[in-house]
Image (cartoon, grey):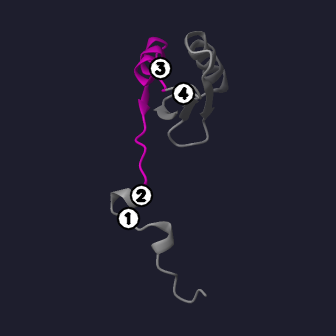
Amino acid sequence: MIEVFKTNVHTPDQTQMLIDQIHNVFEDYKINFDLEDCDNILRIENFTGTVESKVVIDLMLSFGFMAEVLPDEVPWLHGKAKPDTIPAMAGSK
């Protein structure tokens, strides 16, 4: 399972400290941050089960950081056109 969080983490030093702390609790998690994303994404993957989101959020809070789970939305499940049904742009072949 993969869980994606919006965070307020800003520096590589902060990301490394938090990765180390999360690994202290969940050594099997694959963890990375994307600080170039506007939401300063934390991505956690667990190949053997679910990601314990509440524990991760509480751990982040204990170090003074915010984390919130981003919803897993597929646009065409929410009333938007599927990629194969998007009309062609005028003039395209």
Tag on residue 75? 2
Q: Earlier in the sequence, mark 3 or mark 1?
A: 3
Q: Earlier in the sequence, mark 1 or mark 2?
A: 2
Q: Quadrant of residue 67?
A: top left
Q: In the image, is residue 54 part of the stretch drawn in magenta?
A: yes
Q: Earlier in the sequence, mark 4 or mark 1?
A: 4
- Give the Cα distance between marks 3 and 1: 32 Å
Q: Quadrant of residue 82?
A: bottom left
* Residue type of the residue flagged with mark 3: Val
Dot 1 corresponds to which residue?
Answer: 80
Dot 3 corresponds to which residue?
Answer: 56
The x and y percentages for residue 25 are: 55, 11
Asked if residue 46 lies left or right of residue 60, the reply is: right
Numbered disc 2: secondary structure:
helix
Q: Residue at x 40, y 41 (%)?
A: 71
Q: Residue at x 43, y 53 (%)?
A: 74
The x and y percentages for residue 77 are: 37, 57
Whether pointer 1 and pointer 2 mark residues with C-beta atoms closer than 8 Å, the reply is yes
The region drawn magenta spans 50-74
Dot 4 corresponds to which residue?
Answer: 9
